[in-house]
Image: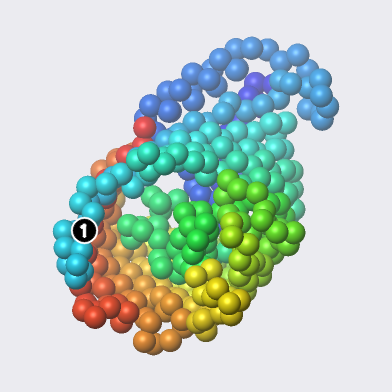
Amino acid sequence: MAAAMMTLPAMADNAVEGKEEFASDERLEEGFLTHYLNEAIARKMESEPSKASDIEYGRKVTDFASAPKFGGYVISKYTYTSKDGEHTGAGFSQRLIRMYVDGRILNDFAYRVQVQTNNDKFHMKDFFVEWQRFPEFKVKIGQFKRAFGFENPLNPWDVGDGDYSQLTKKIAGFSDYIGAESTSNGGRDQGVQIQGDLLPVGRDGHRLLHYQLMIANGQGINVSDNNSQKDVIGTLQIQPVKGLFLGVFGWTGNFTDNAGVTVSRNRYILGMKYDRSDWTLRAEYAHSTGHKVSDHQSDGTWKGNARDDAWYATLGVPFTPWLKTFVKYDVYRDDASWSSMKSIYSVAPNIQLHKNLLFQPQICYVHDRNLAKKNYCELWFETYFRF
């Protein structure tokens, strides 16, 4: 029994009773180097006999932990743009390097630690532990993805289009619409969450209903709360047939910057996604009310209309075992008006020659009504590899 406990998979992401279900965290995989590290650790743990005969909670029980699963990956990028005033673009850059470890303790408690560096900027992405005894009711505490949007919990490998949509970046809390110290949070916050998957249906036993409810600081990652109020974020999703998900997401709360300016965030998303037989379809609409930090005037008044919205649709079509092409229509409106609309039309072939190696060229046509010269093109080329 002890050996079996030692070799449990480190963390069955988005899994319910062995079946892939609703997404709430990034799906992470090991690379070729970390695979050998993980195998060596697992063999070492199996070779050491357990000193206890049963699983039980208590300070003296120390033997029942899975072998931790390590992993890491790198994304590099080349960018060219014809945007007025920014010709040639950023050129070659390091988009990100990530390293993580997953594992389980006492079978019921899953944990994750994930860090990231962008050039000289090193920071913590995730740290959490989640009690997963029952698929119908789980409890997570730490720093992790907000329960907001279908695209938000996706790993950069799985987005398919080279980058997250403007909806996810501006309204789900990546480089948030409100600005200031709320940028670069990766759709994450610190808090506590309950979630569960209910009502197994059909011959395949897929779960019909999923819920998540998160109480969070509202300040983003790696910082303490700047006010006494908390954000409430949640989702309710249904899966009428295997692979098809329909969901509604809500978020209410506020953010206080280091100068003491507080802005509210009241947001919702309506969305769907379909993933089956390597075909992918995602579409979401988001609406937000609440000022930017920069809308606050020195006399205490506010400028702007305190609204923004966004929508996108992504289609991924498999052509061969190593080629899947994504097309995307992506719109963001900074003040929810047609005059502030920025639209991006993109095509991104995903050339995956190995599970640990992906090449992703992408061409984007951009129509931005906020600029004097509204139309321009961008060319990206991203290289992904796991180690």
Residue at image location 74% in from the left, 21% down from the top: 62
Which of 121/252 is in front?
A: 121
Q: Image height check: is 124 above or below 276?
A: above
Can residue 273 be spotted in the picture? no
Q: Residue furthest front?
A: 299
* Residue 160, position as x, y percentages in the image: 35, 57
SS for callout 1: loop
Residue at image location 23% in from the left, 72% down from the top: 365
* Residue 312, position as x, y percentages in the image: 41, 73
Can residue 157 be spotted in the picture? yes
Give the amino acid type for the residue marked by disc 1 in the picture.
Answer: Gly
Q: Image height check: is 175 above or below 134?
A: below
Residue at image location 69% in from the left, 64% down from the top: 232
- Colouring of the image: rainbow
Residue at image location 68% in from the left, 63% down from the top: 231
Question: In the drawing, does residue 130 fall left or right of residue 115?
Answer: right
Residue matched to label 1? 89
* Residue 260, position as x, y percentages in the image: 63, 62
* Residue 197, position as x, y percentages in the image: 68, 58
Q: Image height check: is 295 above or below 87?
A: below
Which of 62/371 is in front?
A: 371
Residue 126 sits in which quadrant?
A: top right
Which of 322/189 is in front?
A: 189
Residue 364 sits in which quadrant?
A: bottom left
Question: In the drawing, does residue 181 fall left or right of residue 319?
Answer: right
The 10 Å Cα crowd at callout 1, few under 14, some 14 to 19, many 20 or more, is: some
**The C terminus appears in which quarter of the rendering?**
top left
Q: Image height check: is 138 above or below 150?
A: above
**The N terminus appears in which quarter of the rendering?**
top right
Question: In the drawing, does residue 277 fall left or right of residue 88?
Answer: right
